[in-house]
Amino acid sequence: MSGVSYHISNLLEKMTSTDKDFRFMATNDLMLELQKDSIKLDEDSERKVVSMLLKLLEDKNGEVQNLAVKCLAPLVGKVKEPQVETMVDTLCSNMVSDKEQLRDISSMGLKTVIAELPLCLTLTASVCKKITSQLIGAIAKQEDVSVQLEALDILSDMLGRAFILLIISVPFYCIHSFIHSFIHSFMLHQLTSPRMAVRKRSILALGHLVPCCSPALFSQLTEHLLTELSKAPPTSVTRTYIQCLATISRQGGHRVGEHLEKLIPMVVKFTSVDDDELREHCFHAFAAFIHRCPKEMSPHVATVTQLCLKFMTFDPNYNYDDEEEEEEDSMDIEDRLDEESDDEYSDDDDMSWKVRRSSIKCLEALIHTRRDLLLSFYSSICPALLARFKEREENVRADVFAAFSTLLRQTRGGPSHHGLGAGSDPGSSQEEEPAVVMLKKQVPLIVKILHRQLKEKSIKSRLGSFCVLTELSQTVPGVLETHIPALIPGVVFSLTDKSTSSTMRIDALSFLHVLLLSHPPQAFQPHMQVLLPPVVSCVEDSFYKITSEALLVTQQLVRVMRPHERTAATAAGFDPKPFVKEVFAVTMKRLKATDIDQEVKERAISCMGHMVCHLGDHLGAELQAVLAIFLERLKNEITRLMAVRTITLIAASPIKINLSSILPETLSVLGSFLRKNQRALKLGTLSCLNALVTHHAASIKPAALEPVLSELPALVDEGDMYVSQVSISLLTCMSRACPSSLAKISSSVLPGVFRLIHSPLLQSGALAAILDFIQALVQSKSSNLGYSQLLKSLTGPFHSRPSSADCPVIHRQSYLSVARCVAALVSSCPAETPAVCPQVKNPGSPEPARHLALLCLGEVGRIGSLGGSKEVQAVILEAFTSTSEEVKTAASCALGSMAVGICRHYPGVLVKCPGAASSLSPHVESIWTLLFQNCECQEEGTRNLVAECLGKLTLVKPAQLLPRLKQQLKAGSPLARSTVVTAFKFTIVDHPAAVDPLLKDGIGDFLKTLQDRDINVRRDALVMFNSAAHNKPSLIRGLLGTVLPHLYKETQIRKDLIREVEMGPFKHTVDDGLDLRKAAFECMYTLLDSCLDGLDVLQFLDHVEEGLKDHYDIRMLTFLMLARLASLCPAAVLQRLDRLVEPLKATCTTKVKAGSVKQEFEKQEELRHSAMRAVAALLAVPEVERSPSMVDFANQIRTNADMASIYQSVQGAQGGNVGATESMDMS
């Protein structure tokens, strides 16, 4: 420490030298020292350094002054608060100095200090207060405009960076008073300054203050601007007020919505004033209104649209001659480049382009925020934008392209905003959206216009054209197939033109890649001779980004040369041989190189892999060299994952590439990858091994698979079901292709497989993989385990007595999994039949064994292996007399499953036979009557089964039975209505069905039960609505307007449904409406994914806000909804943020009363974690730092150890800090 002080003292001494070079070198050395992280100054050294640097600001030498300013940046973080305040005081005092040079250098110093201020609450707030008060005084007292400009500039910087922290540190009434006086006595006065620069900087500073204004103050500010505008001030002042209006609208967010009814007519009026800059500011204001208050702007959309369409063509000084453009279209590219410069119009004084540009940006804002008006946009805005593709001003033309690209992106969004949920609606996937149909009609015109633009020498025009074409290809894949001959010359021109920039080439290649992916290969084969040379040239480019993009395109061109999915058109005779050598040479060069960018390495491997896969039989002797390189890349940690994927591709190639030269070593290396702690590598390796074993089994010796088999036991585990599934699929392939390799698996892999079968987590894909494996294993006869041993291993745990100490707890799912495995085993060994009937008959058998035996009978019967056995029938019927409900349920399932397999054997036992719809037709009436006799049963479980049967039965004859089901809504008790509504739920399936039109016509009548008097009927109606919204949103989209009010009504707490129940000396509160509210909130959550575009998000948020204060279950749901909304509708969430923060804060800060039971503590912890996840999502919303209440809460989390710990755990689970959380110093 003393050494540092001594060195600093020497430097400070040299700074006082009369020699300017000494002072310069000493200051430079000090700056280098301060930039070191390790340096620490004692208090005396801090004071001396600060004093000397402030003194050097007045040095006669400008270079020394500049160095002194640079030293302030690292110094701010090295000294304590008093020294920072000393710096700020001195710099602010210098701002009003008579010396212009000192004022300038002090201004730079203040900006440097502000930029380097740490986001530390006490220090930054203290410094901000000092700077603000002193600068306001300087601006008020100084008549020198340059001082005012600098002070306003610094004030804007300071307010933009740290004003939120100032708000938190000062009591609200004080800061409100300060802002009020600051705006009224100072800022508004500056808006009338004779200097334009002063007015502009004042607007900027005012914009930073607006988020912190109270609603009343914001209203006063808006009213003041309206009043001043109504006085018809001079045009220059009007421009200032309109510009200020746009700024405060952008910064003030939703609060401007209350004043739109007064603002819009005023701004519309000023668009008729003949002043280009004023019109520009008017359209900026419209865009701000649209972005911040899309809902409130709805009544004015037509007016604003008409103004935009009118002024986007406003070019009074230029005549667009369409006929001349048609003639130009026939010109050669070279002639156009020579002649275009003579025809260009230029007028430096013409400002009309600003009007056109701002009106187009306003249209883009409208398209972006109002997807619900997409069809009308295609009727009005789309033709207008296409007509403006001829815009003469390059920057404006770029904005036209950007607006049209936004229109295409919104079209691609699907029925649900941002492409969510509804895009997967099976019921709506059969029909094209009306917007897409309208877009397709415009495609020929789009291509015709862009064909001309691709010949322009303007880089921006070509970039914009490629952007539009890329969006078009992604929005409607295949739509450009007939227009490819017209587009190819423009692409080739951009790739070969010597004056083309790197960005231009990258964009052209990117478009070509999208085009190749989204269109059939045969469309490009006639153009291969033209396309390939420029792409190959780009592969050899020195800039790695161009090379990387070109390799992607080359990969797709290889697929075009010989597609695997060969059709009559592709097999017509295209010969790839002339192109193979050229493509191979450039790709091989990149593949061999080791001193290139990682992205290029990976894409070279992938490209060559596709070449081997599609054209390997054309490579001849070169093939073995390529395979050897792939093996090298497989051993390299950097490239191994891409090499694994490439070998997988080659192994599955239909042209049967000979891999015997690398196969043994490849298998050994792949086996070692299975123990790596990298999930993507494990999954890729398993897929690769699967492909190798499936397609190259003849070349694999059993010993070569031993390294793989030794690693598989660790992968078959319930901890990662998908890895287990893929591992078992590999074992299945081995059983079929290399059965001799599995001789020793009984002691290694099989125990893990049996543990997985008995796991309660096993289902769907993993279970299907195990069933395939068991069948393959038995059929291969390679293992030491036969039918009886496997059966014993499967059923063993179910035969332990419940009283035995080692009896495992058997989950319900385990019974179903084992029963299906037994059925798979029996199907592979038809000669064997499990001796399960005695187990069911024997009263001494453990209940789990009897339960399992019945399920096994059912599953075996489902595959038809039991025939019409009288013994089995008797055993199952006898089981119905058991005292155990589990056994009776299992018997019921067994009888039903057997009926599915061989229903003809049980006409007297079971009338219902769902094996085929035709077999049910003769019995529909009797079943219908029988079911309705039980639809009013008091037991809810029975009613649910009856409802499911009714729903499935209705699907047999929907045209006749659906109207009859609807009639039952009007007759019958509440229990019957409840059953009927639930039955309708079971008619909705998650795939397209012929019954869908009937369901769409009838669902409205069933949803009217949301108004039923009975609470249980309403709850079942909500459950049915939720099912429809989840499985087939197209059924209910058109009804949202009538259904949502009733849905929202059910989210409210009703006091008449809350009652007190006496339990001995205690009173317990029971809320009979809780289940109903929970069902309503579950519907709301589903609608977020499937029907977001049909929701009024602000109204939706009102009910979410109420749910944040409700019961535990509902709060958990609303926290999830809030996190989802933060990513889907950030603008709407920001409008409600101040109201949403309070319930979140209440949840995070609430503590459970001492002496509460353990469950209460656990529930509260779950609530806090869920609330904190919502908080993390809110903090990631752009511009969230503009909300003082949210920033205050974020600071509270940061300073509270308990809440900070929860926040960090939540962030860790989500993958770390993102977005605004970093800027708000949440670490």
Image (cartoon, helix red, strand yellow):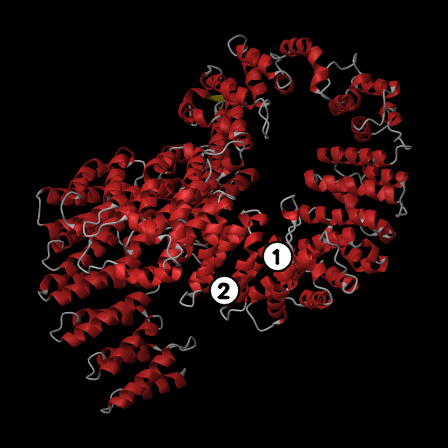
Judge by depth and name the residue closer to the eye, 1 or 510.
510
Q: Quadrant location of residue 709?
A: bottom right
Judge by depth and name the residue closer to the eye, 453 or 80.
453
Graded by Cα atoms within 10 Å as few (under 14), some (14 to 19) or many (20 or more), the crowding at tag 2 reads: many
Name the image quarter holding the N terminus: bottom left
Graded by Cα atoms within 10 Å as few (under 14), some (14 to 19) or many (20 or more), the crowding at tag 1 reads: many
SS at badge 2: helix
Residue carrying label 1 = 558
SS at badge 1: helix
Q: Along the horizontal axis of the image, is 871 left or right of 1133?
A: right
**Relative image position of residue 638 (x, y in whole percent):** 62, 66
Q: Along the horizontal axis of the image, is 1129 left or right of 671?
A: left
Q: Quadrant location of residue 123?
A: bottom left
Where is 177 relative to 809, above or below?
A: below
Residue shown at 16%/60% (left/top)?
A: 197
| Foreground: disc 1 or disc 2 | 1
Residue shown at 11%/45% (left/top)?
A: 228
**Relative image position of residue 325 (x, y in whole percent):** 32, 51
Judge by depth and name the residue closer to the eye, 97 or 199.
199
Q: Quadrant location of residue 379?
A: top left
